[in-house]
Amino acid sequence: MLFSHYINEWLYGEDGYYGTYRPIGKKGDFYTAVSTSKFFGGTIANHIIKRIDEGFLAPDSLICEIGAHHGYLLADIIEFIYTLRPSLLKTFRFGIIERFDALQTQQKNYFAESFGDAVVLEHYHDVSEIDASCAFFIANEIFDAFACELFYKGKIGRVEEGKVLFDVDSPEAVAHAQKYKKDRGEISVGLESFAKTMAQSVPKFEFMSFDYGELSARSDFSIRIYQEHKVIPLFDEALELEKVYGTTDITYDVNFSHVKDAFEGEGLVCTQYSTQLVALIEMGILDLLSLLKEKVSEEIYLQELEKVKILITPSLMGERFKMIRFIQG
């Protein structure tokens, strides 16, 4: 079985890792920016409001998260919109693109518990189902969850009896490797089709995504498994694939040049690529902390400040994670 099929079943098969609800954070296999601080979503809300004021987004825009897991990020965005510009809750539409019905149910329940009837949540299995004239799309750690091929010196990998063997010819993979100047590593599968579907979805939109990776391709393999906050390289000699298949997260570093090329190839404009540190500060995370300081006790403020530090400290998430932003229309 080609590795791309293997990892796709691992993550998205009937009993795959993302097919059922998995906790994220202390009780899960890994942390994300969303599980670290509500101010991650709050800062995105602040940016959305700025885009309204600049005239790019319309007051009746669809605010939509792609791959929302539990729905925490979109909920945080909504909470901060209510705090910063409550009138927009009456005009915005809110939606989640989620392919799994079981996760849609989790998200609906969470929104019902959080907002009651105050927020109507729209659900879509795919971005192609959306009917809107203007939208803001947000995704956190989506590109690292795309299936990938493993490439090594002219061959792509397949899995046989729990081992990765590099003996399959692929002219497409060779061409990709030459384009990005690499002789080994991961090649994301599906970026071009995803970008094409996005480009055909809504006439005018902004798409923002956060992930870990670089603008240039790595010169080695980054693919790894997360299990209860332990990182296990895929090629660890002690690893038995059958024992972790489908029950752990498997991921790799994103080649943002590939992402950029895929979306620009469909006519979208890349308006920003930056570290998470730069992106969150430019979008006003420190301003939001200042507002918080005026309204809460020193103890609560310091607690939230420590969480935000994890998001923006260079040695933690600040430099490791990147933000990329595209617009259409």
Image: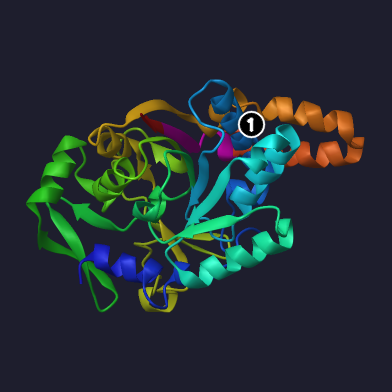
Residue 136 or residue 160, whichever sits in front: 136
Q: Considering the image in quadrants, where does the N terminus appear?
A: bottom left
Determine whether, in the image, residue 218 is placed left or right of residue 63. left
Residue 127 appears at what percent x and percent y? 38, 52
Determine whether, in the image, residue 298 is placed left or right of residue 50. right
The part of the image, by quadrant, that contains residue 178 is: top left
Residue 205 or residue 326, whichever sits in front: 205
Q: Considering the image in quadrants, where does the C terminus appear?
A: top left
Residue 320 appears at what percent x and percent y? 50, 38
Circle 1 crowding by C-alpha within 10 Å: few under 14, some 14–19, many from 20: many
The part of the image, by quadrant, that contains residue 215 is: top left
- Name the image colouring: rainbow
Q: Give the range drawn in magenta.
A: 317-325
Task: From this view, report whether residue 242 is shown above or below residue 48.
Answer: below
The part of the image, by quadrant, that contains residue 89 is: top right
Residue 205 appears at what percent x and percent y? 42, 35
* SS assignment at label 1: helix
Task: From this view, report whether residue 163 is shown above or below residue 218.
Answer: below
Q: Residue furthest right?
A: 297
Determine whether, in the image, residue 328 is placed left or right of residue 42. left
Determine whether, in the image, residue 204 is placed left or right of residue 192. right
Residue 28 visible in image: no
Q: Which residue in the structure is indicated by mark 1?
A: 46
Residue located at (37% from left, 55% from top): 129
Task: From this view, report whether residue 54 is shown above or below residue 216.
Answer: above
The kind of residue on which mark 1 rests is Asn
Q: Is residue 153 magenta?
A: no
Residue located at (60% from left, 64% from top): 108
Residue 193 appears at what percent x and percent y? 25, 50
Task: From this view, report whether residue 116 is shown above or below residue 37.
Answer: below
| Picture mark count | 1
